[in-house]
Image (cartoon, grey):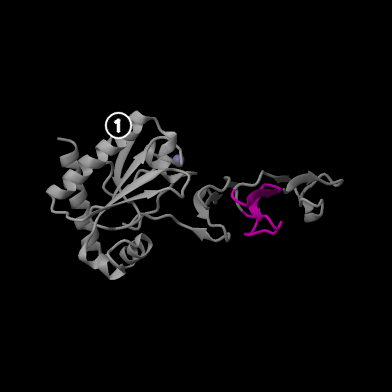
Amino acid sequence: MLSIERGKNGKYGVKNEYGELICDFIYDEIRNYSEGMAAVRVNDKWGYINEQGKEVCEIRYEAVGDFQNKLGVVEKEGKKCYLNLQGDEVAVTNFMNEEMIFEGCKSCAIGNHTITNLPGGYLYEDDFINVTIDPEIPIRGFIVIGIKKHISSTTMLTREERIQIEEITNKVKVALEKLGAKNILLFEDGFSEHYRRWIIPSDDWMFQFGRGKNLKQITTYARKNMSIEQKKSFLLFAEQVKELLNP
Ligand SMILES: [Zn+2]
């Protein structure tokens, strides 16, 4: 266990479980660790230290948030951007190469409409569920069923809620089949903090990755190789799905 402590000089540092000082008393403020990173302040500038007590970036940001989903939101010259766990500034861009601005959990940000440039918008939405296309990965008919509850597993849902997810899944499946999709793959994200279900019609090009079931390779390929014309056609396809989901 790391503990944040105040030194005789009035500044803060970090001690490890053996009481050894792994980060000297040099900070005016240290916030609690989140995902292995703690926000630190010197005068009016912020940065982060890791669990070894080392700075992962320059202490130069006007404001920082706690790490969530491996990203920390920071503010520089009044503009928000993101740091990854290595302390590099990264942008989360949608597949039309526009930056998506949000704080914390992306699935929650989609659920509460914080992200205003979701490609294809909302294909279906009610009090509990939102259906979108994956904003970052351009694949025809790659549908994401999101829920407006920040939970990691459907085991935390009521029976009624699980039935709602199955019902919308079935509606999406029927819509995709009407639009010519054949083998429809279903994946559940049980590793992230926020549950979601992915529905992907398999396409010939995916089979180079072995029956089209290796999601990571498929999504990496799609991000690299889809042309702007293809992406635009995926948006039109999403529009057709939307019409079928909202008769
Ligand atoms: Zn969430």
Whether residue 24 appears in magenta in the rendering, the answer is no
Image quadrant of ligand 1?
A: top left
- Residue 195: image quadrant is top left
Q: Is residue 113 in view?
A: no
Q: Is residue 64 left or right of residue 243?
A: right
Q: Residue furthest right?
A: 8
- Amino acid at circle 1: Asp
Kindly identify the residue that appears in the image at 56 percent across and 48 percent down: 67
Ligand 1 within 8 angstroms of badge 1 C-beta: no
Which residue is tagged 1? 126
Q: Nearer the viewer, residue 169 or 148?
A: 169
Q: Residue furthest bottom?
A: 208
How many labels, in total?
A: 1
Q: Where 36 sits versus 125, above or below?
A: below
Q: Which residues are magenta?
A: 35-60
Kindly identify the residue that appears in the image at 31 percent across and 37 percent down: 165
Q: Is residue 107 left or right of residue 85?
A: left
Q: Is residue 111 in view?
A: yes
- Residue 162: image quadrant is top left
Crowd rating for badge 1 (residues with CA inside 10 Å; few <14, some 14–19, many 20+): few
Q: Position of residue 217 (x, y in %)?
A: 36, 65
Q: Nearer the viewer, residue 17 or 54?
A: 17
Q: Position of residue 130 (x, y in %)?
A: 32, 38
| Secondary structure under the numbered disc 1 in the rendered image | loop
Q: Position of residue 138 (x, y in %)?
A: 29, 58
